[in-house]
Image (spheres, grey):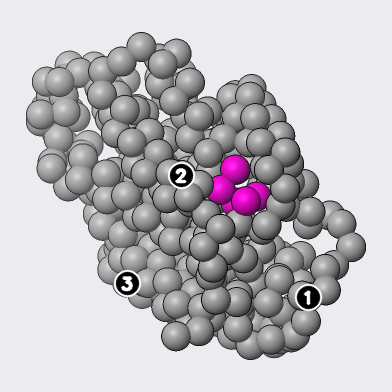
Amino acid sequence: MPMARWVGRLGCLLLVAGCATWAWVAALQGPVDAAATRGSDSENCRIELELYVIDLRLAPLLLAVAGVGLLLAPRVRSFGIGSAVMAGAAVTAEAVTAALEAVGAPPFITSAALLVALVVVVRVGRRWSGPDVVVARRLTVAVGLVLLCSPFPMEVYLDFDAAILEGLPSGYLVSVRVLQGLMLAAGAACLLLGAKRLTVLHAVAAVAGGLGLFFAAVEADVWWQLASLCAVVALVTAAAVAGEGSRPRRVAAAAILSGLLYLPFFWVCLLFQFGLGAVPLELNGGHIDYDGLPVFLSGPLSAVIVVAFVMWGAGWFEPPEADRSPSTSPAPDHVEA
């Protein structure tokens, strides 16, 4: 089966899953507020949990926007156009959900409207048709890298005393894990589907991503957790660059630089997104206070440096190769390295 069909099917799955899980998370705010109020005498605790539930809604929106990108990948003629349409989809998603939330629409109605709006974005984006095998692969890989860098900040949503966590509705805890799992699984699938060729690094990176999330969830020294995260980023970068058929030295250089610089860049993104994260919070009825800050956008923003090193290591900045020719398939058949 052509890879274009698999990329499109994954895009449909993410688009629907993102819209559905948005309704799930939005419906949790009331029960979480009530449970937090009962479980703690501190008003700050309730406000902080409310902020996290609102910030958590960005995770389903990211999944939906990633679905838009994958639906466009086999048809879009340039990486820039694909990125621009995805940015437009992100703005559209936030505007639609915030507007309907403001008028008190039920979550399932807002979710359905979100799905319709993003389908329209896909239809408009496909007007710039001109399928290109290289563009399709690169856009698919870039989407996968963003998804793989996004689940780890969500651990903060579970960073509460045991007594409070036990009193929260199970759907809150489950939703965080489900969203993290969807991002990791979809990101790994994108990395595999977008590869020009498959190598053993792809399998290692996919396993490392899951293990990294597991170790992030257990009680451990924070520096060990951060070191594990940087190692996962390095492996993912190496797999993406190796999938383009780059030389081993370039694969190693991109992986090492990405792993070393990811953490400082992540901290910069964390500071930067406090202001940026205030926008969706305000639009959805929340606000940044001294007791809590949004964290989710630091994941997608930090993926920029990973994508940049993959672009350099895989030679995306260099003149097009001979295999760059129009095609309706996003990638040739995979071959073992």
Q: Which label was assigned to residue 60?
A: none
Mark yes or no: residue 268 visible.
no
Residue 162: say if magenta.
Answer: no
Q: Position of residue 298 (x, y in %)?
A: 55, 36
Relative to 101, 174 lies left or right: left
Considering every residue shown, the one lying at the far front of the view is 337
- Residue occupied by mark 2: 205
- Residue occupied by mark 1: 324
How far apart in space, not on screen, are marks 3 and 1 (Cα)? 43 Å
- Looking at the rendered structure, the secondary structure element under dot 2 is helix
Q: What is the chief secondary structure element of the magenta stretch?
A: helix
From which residue to which does the magenta span run? 238-242
Quadrant of the snapshot with the N terminus: bottom left
Residue at the image point whose x is 63% and y is 24% from the top = 260
**CB under 8 Å between discs 3 and 1:** no
How far apart in space, not on screen, are marks 2 and 3 (Cα)? 38 Å
Q: Looking at the picture, which amino acid does disc 2 mark?
A: Ala
Q: Position of residue 205 (x, y in %)?
A: 46, 44
- Looking at the rendered structure, the secondary structure element under dot 3 is helix
- Residue occupied by mark 3: 109
Using a 10 Å C-alpha cutoff, classify the residue at mark 2 as few (fewer than 14 neighbours), some (14 to 19) or many (20 or more).
many
Relative to 56, 327 lies left or right: right
Mark in the foreground, 2 or 3: 2
Q: Looking at the picture, which amino acid does disc 3 mark?
A: Ile
Relative to 107, 252 lies left or right: right
- Please tell me which residue lies in front, 19 or 136: 136
Q: Position of residue 12 (x, y in %)?
A: 42, 76
